[in-house]
Amino acid sequence: MKKIFCIVMATVLTWSIHAQNSITYIENQLLIQLAQGVNAYEFAANSLQSIAPKRLLSKRLNIWLFQFTDDTEQRSTQQRNARKNNLSSNSDVIHVQNNHTGIVSRPSVTPFDVICTQNNHIHAVSGPPVGLRL
């Protein structure tokens, strides 16, 4: 049992490390979480950076997808980090990160239980409702 557990854990850890290396970013786009009550359009207008909100991603957390409006196609890593650091120093900003692409969710896990498919269909099981004692 320990041997199987170690093999499974090594496979999962190896897969997750490999998956993190393949993540890339979309040039000229940032995900920015603003403080509660901050209007994204006013934030962009008052910012020293040439950015514009593109889409609201989470209303509850006030997370927006912003896009740089200048004509620069490709930036160096130093330029990109300087712009991110400049934006994150603003008191209205909680978090700034690149808009990543290529993120793959974890594959579904299938249990080794041979009758698992029969157990998962609870609506097919006949019996008294839960909580009733007969």
Image (cartoon, grey):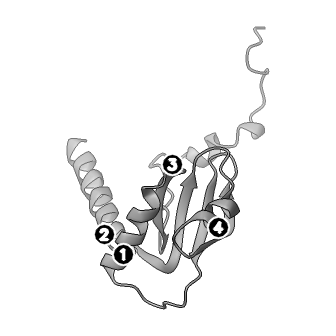
Q: Are marks 1 and 3 in contact (CB under 8 Å)?
A: no
Q: Residues within 10 Å of mark 3 (few under 14, many from 20)?
A: few
The residues bearing labels 3 and 2 have C-alpha atoms spaced at a distance of 30 Å
User: What is the quadrant of the C terminus in the image?
Assistant: top right
Q: Which residue is mark 1?
A: 22
Q: Residues within 10 Å of mark 2 (few under 14, many from 20)?
A: few
Q: Quadrant of residue 64?
A: bottom right
Say which of 47 and 112 sits in front: 47
For the residue marked with disc 4, what is the amino acid? Ala
Mark 2 or mark 1, which is nearer to you? 1
Q: Which residue is mark 3?
A: 114
Q: Are marks 2 and 1 in contact (CB under 8 Å)?
A: yes
Q: Which residue is mark 2?
A: 18
Q: Is residue 22 left or right of residue 128?
A: left
Q: Quadrant of residue 2?
A: top left
Q: Residues within 10 Å of mark 1 (few under 14, many from 20)?
A: few
* Residue, far top: 134
Q: Which residue is mark 4?
A: 45
The label shown at residue 49 is: none
- Sooner in the amino-acid sequence: mark 2 or mark 4: 2
